[in-house]
Every structure is written in C-alpha cells, then in structure tokens.
Image (cartoon, rainbow, N blue to C red):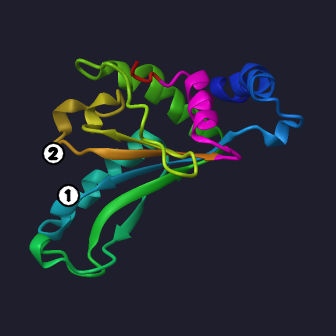
Amino acid sequence: MAPRLQETYRNTILPELREQFGFENVMEAPHLEKIVVNMGVGDAIQDQRLLETAMSELATITGQKPAIRKAKKSISNFKVREGANIACMTTLRGARMYEFMDRLLNVALPRVRDFRGVPKNSFDAQGNYTLGVREQTIFPEININNVTHARGMNVTFVIKNARSVEESRELLRKFGMPFRN
C-alpha cells in the first residue's frame, strides 16, 4: 500500500501543478526526489558515545540506519581534526520519504511551541528546501526521559525538475508545508 502523501501527490497535486504551470507531460512537473536528514554532533570529539546516541535517535526518527559523516578539514578553533566523526545523516527515498514527511508536517511541527510556520526563503538556487529543527524531542518516537542532549537537525527536501523556486514552493505548499505569511 502506498503512503498517504504519495497517493495525494499522484491524484491531486500532480494534476493541479500541470494545470497551474502548463506542463504538457507529467514528467515535466517537479517532484520530491529525496529527503536528507543531517544531525551534527560536535561533542562527539570528546565522547564517542554521544554520536552513537544521536545515531540511534536518528534511526528511530527516520526508520533507517544513519551513516557517519567525517570532518573534511581540521579547524583548530573548534578542536576538530580532519577525518573525525562529527555528524550522522540519512537519505530517505520512496515510501519512507513520504512517511517521514507526513509525520514531520502533521505530527512533529505542530508540537513546536509558539510555531508560526516555516520560513519561505530557505530555498537554494536549484529549488531545494532546507528546514532546521531545534530539538529531536518534537518527534513522538523519541522518549523525552531518555534524552540527555537536545540535538538539532537539518531536513533537506530535494526537489527534481523544478525550473524555479516558485514551482518548488508551490509543490511543498500543496503537500501541506506550513509556510509563514
């Protein structure tokens, strides 16, 4: 069975985008290719267990085992050496991507205190959208009593075939992304 948002995209969002932007073919319309979730763990330089905890929390949130990311270069002010394990990330595609997006938009973001929407200007030149989350505790899968450090994460929505930022924004808005007015 296909996820709810995937069915919504096929049955309602895609025809609306074709009509709104005048796409001749369904393959011209922008679509969500993947979602990349990245969690930086700078404290892992002193204590490797912090990275393991962050990886288990990220695996719980996304339903997929994260990969360890290493520092690309040494930065003496932050006491980071090249090759040190400093982050974990996972790339979601297909059904897991739509399930994660559904939980993020309908369960996690409404749990943020004083939530007024996400910023409209976080698009890059290719039309991808990056959203910063301050704490992992907004996800219901995480037990707040077991959390030792509040960790933020970046969630990047990679959109394919978007010719402009307006097309990308409209696609995410139709998925239910709560943009600020």
Residue drawn at x 43%, y 31% is: 120
Residue displayed at 80% across by 28% down: 18
Vertical placement of residue 160 versus 88, above or below? above
In the image shown, does 117 or 113 lie closer to the viewer?
117
Above or below: residue 2 compared with residue 32: above
Q: For the residue labelled by badge 1, is the local secondary structure a helix, a strand or a loop?
A: helix
- Which circle marks residue 61 in the picture? none
- Name the amino acid type tagged 2: His
**In the rendered view, does 156 fall on the left or right side of 151?**
right
Quarter-of-image position of residue 88: bottom left
Q: Percent x, y for residue 49? A: 20, 61
Residue range corresponding to the magenta coloring = 160-177
Disc 1: which residue: 50
Please identify the quadrant where the N terminus is shown: top right
Let me know if residue 164 is in the magenta part.
yes
Q: Residue at point 19% right, 64% down?
A: 44
Task: Name the residue located 23 percent from the left edge and 80 percent from the top edge.
Answer: 74
Question: Would you place residue 15 above or below residue 163 in this image?
Answer: above
Q: Do the residues labelled 1 and 2 touch (CB within 8 Å)?
A: yes
How far across and down, in percent of the image, does residue 104 sit?
A: 44, 29
